[in-house]
Image (tube, grey):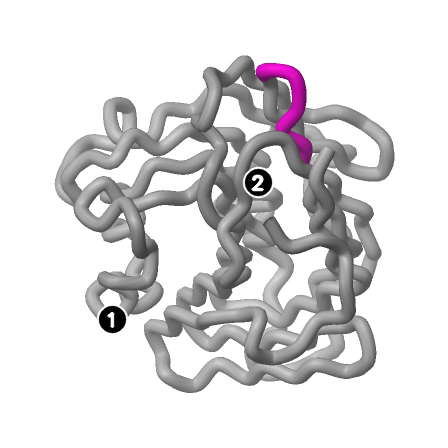
Amino acid sequence: MASARPLTPGDWKAEDHSGRMELRLESDTLDIVSPEGVTLWYCPRLEDDYEISYHACVCMQGGPHDRLSDLNCFWGAADPASPDDLFARSAWRNGIFPRYKTLTLFYVGYGGNNNSTTRFRRYYGADEECPDATARPVIREYSDPDHLLRPNRWLHIVIRVEQGATTYTVDGEELFRQEVGPGTCDGHFGLRLLENHVRIAGFEVKPL
């Protein structure tokens, strides 16, 4: 597993539906403009107990793709069709959201549905045509303003896999928790963005 260290552009692999994503790395900050759906995978595979942490901001500054929605992420991602190589079918997925149903993973859609919901889901590696209730059921959901996005506000996000549970915390508040078995969260982390402009700063991964 990769430990905390400075990022390089080679740490990330994009699956970009539009083919027009803009990605800049400035010191410890990723600046990402997503005209359509983008999954930006962190290339090292994570195993056992670990912590992912980063600061994130959805930018609303009048840009053509500035939209207050969809600060989303995947973790523990694996492809049952290619267990040893998540990226074997990158070209097929290509940022097209229904195709991610074929993976096993955990997902948080923070400020999804045009910033009306924040949802925690588990994906079970189903067919892309499988109904959401089966393929990626909602474990828990928020819709109150305190758990939605605000323009240009930085959030500190921490995802942990530790002692048989995975958690998702924002600014010190644990929003989601799920008990997991050994190896359930082994896999890749990915930022999942849609028609927005996002900055990610201070991204770190460390074993626990």
Crowding around mark 2 (Cα neighbors within 10 Å: few <14, some 14 to 19, many 20+) is some
Q: Amino acid at mark 2?
A: Ser
Residue 151 seen anywhere in this rendered image of the structure = no
Determine the main secondary structure of the stretch shown in magenta. strand
Which of the pair 56/52 is nearer the observer? 52
Which of the pair 158/206 is nearer the observer? 206
Horizontal and vertical percent for residue 23?
59, 81
Residue at x 24%, y 71% (from the top left corner): 91
Residue at x 26%, y 50% (from the top left corner): 98
Q: Which residue is mark 1?
A: 91
- What residue span does the magenta drawing correspond to? 159-164
Above or below, 80 against 122 in this view is below
Q: Is residue 161 magenta?
A: yes
Name the element at disc 1: helix
Residue at x 35%, y 33% (from the top left corner): 123
Task: Classify residue 140 as left or right of residue 100.
Answer: right
| Circle nearer the N terminus (1, 2) | 1
Q: Which residue is mark 2?
A: 116
Horizontal and vertical percent for residue 195?
49, 68
Above or below, 146 against 65 in this view is above
Q: Amino acid at mark 1?
A: Ala
Which of the pair 151/139 is nearer the observer? 139
Residue at x 29%, y 65% (from the top left corner): 90
Separation of marks 1 and 2 at Cα, in angstroms: 31 Å
Above or below, 140 against 49 in this view is above
In the rendered structure, find residue 53 and report the number of the disc placed on it. Answer: none
Task: Classify residue 93 as left or right of residue 191.
Answer: left
